[in-house]
Image: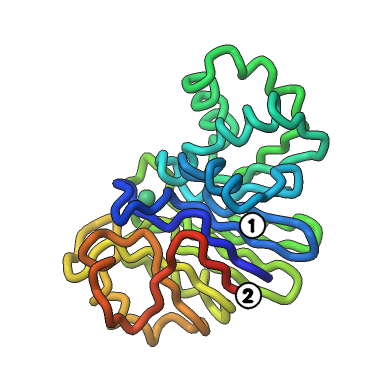
């Protein structure tokens, strides 16, 4: 599996980084994990054909994580009319949230959405099985109205895990268990606050996370300015084979 980092910035674009979006690729198929506002631009930058993205997984309803879906959809409607089906998976009410956002940003386009073959699936208690993929999403600790989730994607023999936005949550333990790659948010350096993780706590709890590699995302300026951290920092455009 290959990870292409389309965006690993925080909500404020610190470090000039793009909004949250990670492209997972195997055998000519792509899955998009998060689709922050800048995602379509970054997909173009990487010359990704939208048609080859079969599935979009959304961690929660904040603009830096799902605000890019309307841009993806208008490109799929008007620029390069999409022929293949698309599955959009996210927290409960994903279809309504996407529809509202599309209509807010591009008034009048919601009525055209039926031209695309989109299946919306909501996270629930059971894992979601889609062909050779299994998706587990568990609630995490972030602004409750955004319905925050961490995501675990098992695809063929590889496991990708993503914290979403969260302060420490015991659900991170099963989400990243034996994961080949765990992308974990690390907004703060020392500050412990609800909604985001800090580096110190992540170091302290490293032993609880039974995964091979932790890569940091969603870093604020203080974390970005550190030269020697015990975890690797992601950057936009980075590609990791695992
Ligand atoms: Zn965020």
Image position of 23 with respect to 71: above or below = below
Task: Tell me what residue is drawn at x 57 percent, y 49 percent.
Answer: 45
Image position of 232 with respect to 35: above or below = below
- Give whichever of discs 2 and 1 has the lower sequence position: 1
Left or right: 135 in relation to 198 = right
Could you say where residue 170 lies in the image, as x and y percent from the top left?
Answer: 39, 70
Could you say where residue 196 lies in the image, as x and y percent from the top left?
Answer: 29, 59
Real-space Cα distance between discs 2 and 1?
29 Å
In this view, the residue in front, 203 or 106, is 106
Looking at the rendered image, the disc whose residue lies closer to the viewer, 2 or 1, is 2
In this view, which residue lies farthest toward the top? 108
Task: Tell me what residue is drawn at x 32 percent, y 66 percent.
Answer: 186
Q: Secondary structure at mark 2?
A: strand
In this view, the residue in front, 39 or 205, is 39
Left or right: 73 in relation to 212 = right
Task: Tell me what residue is drawn at x 38 percent, y 87 percent.
Answer: 207
Q: Secondary structure at mark 1?
A: loop
Name which quarter of the figure residue 110 lies in: top right
Name which quarter of the figure residue 179 lies in: bottom right
Would residue 123 be visible to someone looking at this image? Answer: no
Could you say where residue 161 lies in the image, as x and y percent from the top left?
Answer: 54, 68
In this view, which residue lies farthest toward the left? 191
- The numbered disc on residue 126 is 1
- The numbered disc on residue 241 is 2
CB atoms of marks 2 and 1 within 8 Å: no
Could you say where residue 90 lies in the image, as x and y percent from the top left?
Answer: 56, 45
Q: Residues within 10 Å of mark 2 (few under 14, many from 20)?
A: few
């Amino acid at each position: 599996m290959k990870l292409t980092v389309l965006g690993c910035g925080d909500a404020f674009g610190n470090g000039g980084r793009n909004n949250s979006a990670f492209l997972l690729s195997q055998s000519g198929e792509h899955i998009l994990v998060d689709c922050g506002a800048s995602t379509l631009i970054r997909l173009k930058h990487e010359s990704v054909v939208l048609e080859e993205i079969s599935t979009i997984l959304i961690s929660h309803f904040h603009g830096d994580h799902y605000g890019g879906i309307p841009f993806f959809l208008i490109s799929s409607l008007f620029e390069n009319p999409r022929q293949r089906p698309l599955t959009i998976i996210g927290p409960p009410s994903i279809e309504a949230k996407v529809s509202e956002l599309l209509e807010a940003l591009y008034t009048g386009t919601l009525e055209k959405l039926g031209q695309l073959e989109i299946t919306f699936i909501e996270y629930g208690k059971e894992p979601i099985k889609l062909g050779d993929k299994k998706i587990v999403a568990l609630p995490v600790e972030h602004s409750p109205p955004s319905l925050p989730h961490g995501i675990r994607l098992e695809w063929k023999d590889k496991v990708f895990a993503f914290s979403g936005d969260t302060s420490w949550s015991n659900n991170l333990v099963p989400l990243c268990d034996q994961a080949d790659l765990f992308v974990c948010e690390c907004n703060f350096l020392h500050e412990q606050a609800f909604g985001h993780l800090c580096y110190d706590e992540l170091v302290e709890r490293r032993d609880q996370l039974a995964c091979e590699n932790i890569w940091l995302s969603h870093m604020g300026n203080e974390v970005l300015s550190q030269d020697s951290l015990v975890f690797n920092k992601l950057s936009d455009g980075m590609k990791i084979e695992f």
